[in-house]
Amino acid sequence: MSTDTERDPPAYDADVSKETIPDREDQALLEVRDLDAGYGDLQILTDVDLDVADGEYVTIVGPNGAGKSTVMKSVFGLTSHMGGTVIFEGEDITGRRPEEIIHEGIGYVPQNDNVFASLTVRENLEMGAYILDSVPQDALDAVFERFPILEERQSQKAGTMSGGQQQMLAMGRALMLDPSLLLLDEPSAGLAPDLVDDMFDRIDAINDDGTAVLMVEQNAKEALRRCDRGYVLANGRNRYMDDGDALLTDEQVRRDFLGG
């Protein structure tokens, strides 16, 4: 699977991006402003703006190398911050470490290596509440209700589970602290085609229950069909922002980013 640094992205002209992004600062849960970030001295993102409202479902799409995953990692404090701000629930969390950001109410599910393979399902879920003095039983019960297979397999080593089950476990662990915002990086990556719709349905249900979702997704068309709003990134910059349905029907977006 490609990462943001593996190849040169297509040479789209993103200088018009600010004209396509309306002001959405009213009641924003997450506000990313003029974000510059990367890895070490390598800058990937330039001047990125992004908002997620309370309870909203937002998707980031774009070509390989666009910086999509870097946006997620930057919100969660996993990149080199080079400029701009990240505001969550009105508080500046720019440059904070992931263990601090978890306390603020943000859960993160990375694309790769997102379970502890040598630990059991239950131990993985308990790790999701490691910042607490004890694991809340009601949190475990809520995860088991949402993902019954995890309760059935709670004594199984996570590394022996299927890809779809591991993805459910990773999401379950991120939900153990009942976050206000869930960050999902390529949740359908590596899943068999017949499991992709089920995974999206589960994400829809999490959002329907009140958790805001910010998702990077390779299956851009399906993600845009389901989300409230979408952002298109190219060359580490904002390219377009609109309602998911509007982006799906925009002729230039379809031609340049969605395969016609």
Image (spheres, rainbow, N blue to C red):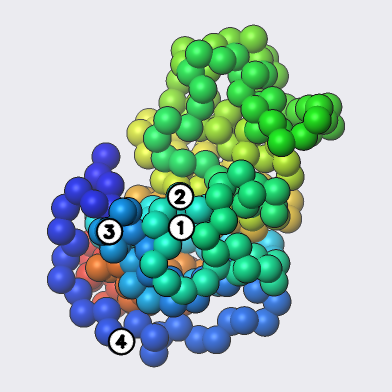
Pointer 3: what residue? 41
**Which residue type carries mark 4?**
Val
In this orientation, which residue lies closer to the viewer: 62 or 252? 62
Mark positioned earlier in the residue sequence (4 or 1)? 4
Q: CA distance from mark 4 to mark 1?
A: 23 Å
Marks 2 & 1, CB-CB < 8 Å contact: yes
Q: For the residue carrying disc 4, how many other residues have a C-alpha within 10 Å: few (<14), some (14-19), or many (20+)?
A: few
**Which residue type carries mark 3?**
Asp
Dot 1: element: helix
Q: Is residue 126 in sight in this rendering?
A: yes
Dot 2: element: loop
Q: CA distance from mark 4 to mark 3?
A: 26 Å
Mark carried by residue 16: 4
Q: For the residue carrying disc 3, how many other residues have a C-alpha within 10 Å: few (<14), some (14-19), or many (20+)?
A: few
Q: CA distance from mark 2 to mark 4?
A: 28 Å
Dot 4: element: loop
Instruction: Give how far across and how far down residue 115 sits, in percent.
Output: 51, 27
